[in-house]
Image (cartoon, helix red, strand yellow):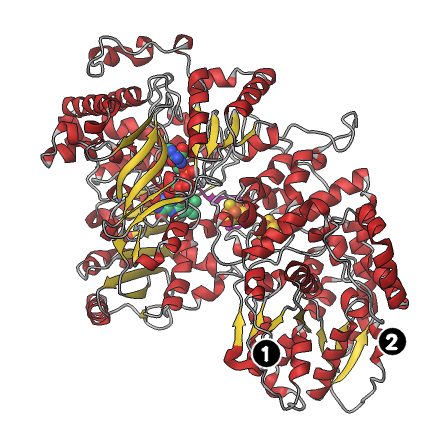
Amino acid sequence: MREAFGEAGRESLPFGMTSLPILSQSAVSPVVRARGLDEDAREAIARDLVNAVEGEVRFDAHNRMLYATDASLYQVEPLGVVIPSSIDDAVAAVRFCSERGLPMLPRGGGTSLAGQCTNNAVVIDVSPRCRHILEVNVGQRYVRVEPGITVDDLNDAIAATGMFFAPDPATARHASIGGCIGNNAAGSRSVRYGRTSESVIAVDACLADGTRVEFGPGSARRDERVAKLTQRVVELVRRYEGLIRERSPKTIRRNAGYGLDMILQQLDKGVAPEDVSLAPLLCGSEGTLAFTLGATLALHDRPKAKALAVLSFATLDDAIDAVIPILATKPSAIELLDDLVVSLARANTEYRKYVELLPPPPGGSGELNAVLYVEYFGASDAEVSERVEALKRACPASPVQVHTNVTAMLNAWKLRKAGEPLLHGIPGSRKPITFVEDNAIPVENLSRFVKELRKIVESYGTRAAFYAHASVGVLHVRPLIDIHDEADRERMRAIAVATADLARSLGGVMSGEHGDGRVRGPLLERFYGPELMQAFRELKLIFDPQGLLNPGNIVDVFGDNPRPVASITQSLRVEPQVGRPAAFPQVETSFDFSDQHGLDGAVEMCNGSGVCRKKQSGTMCPSYMATLDERHSTRGRGNALRLAITGQLKLDTVGEASQPDADVWSDQGTIETLDLCLSCKACKTECPSNVDISKLKAEYTSQRYIRHGAPLAVKIMSQIRTLNRLGAIAPEAANAMNALAGGLIRRVLGIDARRTLPTFSTSLARLWGDETKPSKPVVVLFGDCFTMYNESSIGMATKRVLEAFGYEVRLANAGCCGRAKISLGMLPQAIEEIDATLEKLQPVIDDDRVVAVLVAEPSCLSAFKDDWQTLQLKTPKAQREKLAKKSWLPEQFLHAKWDSHPQRPAMKPPAGRVLLHGHCHQKALWGAASSADMLRRVAGDKLTVLDTGCCGMAGSFGYAEHRFDLSMQIGELALFPAARAMTPKDVLVAPGTSCRHQVHDGVGKRAVHPMQFVADCLA
Ligand SMILES: Cc1cc2nc3c(=O)[nH]c(=O)nc-3n(C[C@H](O)[C@H](O)[C@H](O)COP(=O)(O)OP(=O)(O)OC[C@H]3O[C@@H](n4cnc5c(N)ncnc54)[C@H](O)[C@@H]3O)c2cc1C
Ligand code: SF4
Ligand code: SF4
């Protein structure tokens, strides 16, 4: 041990120690010991753990690797994963690890950017189950919570109190309170509310040996153990007092090393040593000092009035120069975006609309190269308006857009919040990499810092994106680096060192809010010097003498101190083993991935930022929302696919263990991880990096079926059109057959007994009748499988409505869109079917008299407009694009061409409320407005668009026996409660056939198609 400390360690031993602690296992790092464990030893640990904890123990290779990454560049395989069922269970897990000398990594949302949430340790994930609110004390303005709750969940739950937990990292929707404490998180409004440490009153913690303690004001007087720890910490701080004063960063935002300055500040204020609270010290300690079991958090009043002013600038320098004058107007936040982020948002389907909210560039025409978001909180509208006026006086040359409406402000903020994840969508092999993204610089030096940093970055032949919490001088800089290229990695190390030195020379610090982790830990000694690093090591040993908690982060009490700069580019996810980059197989794919740099690029799109772990609003990701399980989030699936395809997962064979030709497409764990994906396409738009799991899942599954064949049930289900067509020949007999042979059908297809089977109707073709009205403009109804054979009444309703609007309506019985085959992963078969359908649609595509092709089922229209455009079909792209352009949902067409229809029928308004549940594909690709706009024309303000996310059915997904319960859980998230709350007069409108089926099976109510609703309203 003494060798590990070197000479400095011998000179200054922690208070009360005559020698440094004797570490078990002859002072070998617990991580090194953990790495040395073979599979048998690991399995033995897992078996014992299962008996020691109530929660889940996941030690298999697949689950381990799903926890090998956070939102950083790194990938480190953990020893195993525990998901405690309760706080007591988390303590049991810590005790277990402590007794066996196993390293531990506490984890919340896993959204850390510096690699501090990756380690070769037992990951203890408190985010799924330890997320309760324990007490809300309105009078004393505090709340007590468990560590796994997210900031937004907490604030939503206490909204009625008129107060809130103020620290607001951009990840507030999915970052846990434990993680906010671990990283001392802060957000845009830190200029007003400070960091997490300023809102933490006390922390309920578990020490590395499994002892439960509370750290807070007066805790040392109540608990002898805390008293001893406090005494030793105070002694340490006194001993290093001079250096702490001299070297600690002076910026509001600082998150480098341990916050010894926060202990010194208490002493400076005259707090007696025995009254010093150690809670602030845990803030920013990155899980290395104690395990947070809960926290008492101070609450602030929600502001009564707010305004958001968005200003545009011609140059980044102009924007930065404006920060100091703006600060004088007392804003609650000033946020900066540069031109790179704005241009990426412009190219993103989801975020384009937010760019349109930005003010015009200065001078009316020139370039918009930077944007400042300036927010004001106040006690009244008058106070806020006064500040906005002051802002306009401070920046007379900058065009400004002022928002006071809540929705408009939220929409404007969305662009700023998506700044970081959007950068990951940048094309080219050089990406804006996170390694010098966290500098905090005194605001008066910010402009100089930007200029100097630009020079540094340019001297290495690259450029950078800039965005910032400008009010507190935190500048997120992302140089463009090809992390796959060793020469660029060398540039990265050099830029990291130069930037850290520059930040320090300007009175700032390289870790403003994202922490040190693997990327900045090696630079800490450059900032603090060897003596304070020694103080940090002593502190670590006071709390964690065996070095078990997130070992190697901030300080390494066993290995290199500090870690060498070279380690910044070690354990990268693109090169998990030195000299062995992740390898991609060369295969012919059914989808075209060229817009994502091929399949390789597509599987590397997920950066781990965890937006898909949100619970609030939107559809992404239904299976995560219902399970709160990392494995069933979009990120879990993205990681699984990347790891499987690059051969990094130990392959378990499909079916028999003896099967010899297991390949990267047949990893059993990945198959199971993908199994709960509903292919809802929500991630394609809601994920800021546009990770498209439904496409990747289809390709992965297809590659496996090409090699190993598809199961019988998949083959049958993929023939949905043929089955429906047969059923529709004699629908009554077929429905009776279904009732009689339902058990057998369910057994063969694996359908749950509680699920009703679809019924057949007389074929739409037989009902259709005469369609030749030569004088009228023509619209064509695409006869999808459901409208043709199961719900032909929808087709007839569509015909009636379109005729009432003066069209000749023709039916295109052209075949299937291939949706079922695509979702099931039968891609070559889907391609064949789609090309055949397109051939039959050719006359419709070419006939200019056909003004629109109407598709009643959104998942079929999404095939036309999305999947058909990227599948490697024989039909020329131009034909597919032409068809996509003239294809609409019927209600979408009626609204869009409202002023040019040949005639407009009279409508009668509905008696009750009209509730719209949009289909996932519709919401992902065109928004629920594609149905809502027309319904509003009929129902006016009786229309409510439900914020329901996914219904849980998703084609064949919800039929499966093993997915039925999850399917119902997803329905219960929002759709079922809304449907149950309907009065008999209300109408539930759902364009998707699956959604209507799900409502029927889930709550026993009827939902109608928009065209049925409109037809019923024809006067
Ligand atoms: C796109 C993006 C934007 C971000 N913006 C911001 C921002 O504006 N401000 C900001 O401060 N950060 C930001 N971050 C970083 C990160 O999201 C926040 O710091 C967040 O608070 C981390 O929370 P988490 O639950 O994900 O923590 P995790 O990543 O799970 O953990 C963070 C650290 O805390 C430790 N930890 C977690 N739980 C516990 C526990 N129960 N006990 C002890 N230690 C624990 C972990 O070991 C780890 O070292 C951003 C990240 C991304 C990807
Ligand atoms: S899937 Fe998208 S939202 Fe989820 S972590 Fe990856 S990049 Fe972020
Ligand atoms: S397609 Fe839907 S269910 Fe699947 S990962 Fe994306 S958001 Fe989740």
Q: Is residue 460 visible?
A: no
- Name the residue carrying label 2: 766
**Residue at 35% of width from left, 73% of height from top?**
364
Q: Residue 886 occupies which quadrant of the picture?
A: bottom right
For marks 2 and 1, the one nearer the N-term is: 2
Q: Is residue 127 above or below residue 749?
A: above
Is residue 91 or residue 135 the one in the foreground? Answer: 135
Name the quarter where the C terminus is drawn. bottom right
Q: Depth check: 481 or 375 in front? A: 375
Q: Which residues are magenta?
A: 425-435
As for residue 419 lying within the magenta part, the answer is no
Frontmost residue, 807 versus 292: 292
Left/right of residue 443 with respect to residue 79 in the rendered view: left
Measuring from the top left, give residue 212's x and y in whole percent.
34, 27
Indicate whether 286 appears above or below 592. above
C-alpha separation, residue under disc 2 versus residue under disc 1? 29 Å
Residue at the far left in the pictured view: 270
Which residue in the structure is indicated by mark 1?
934
Q: Secondary structure at mark 2?
A: helix
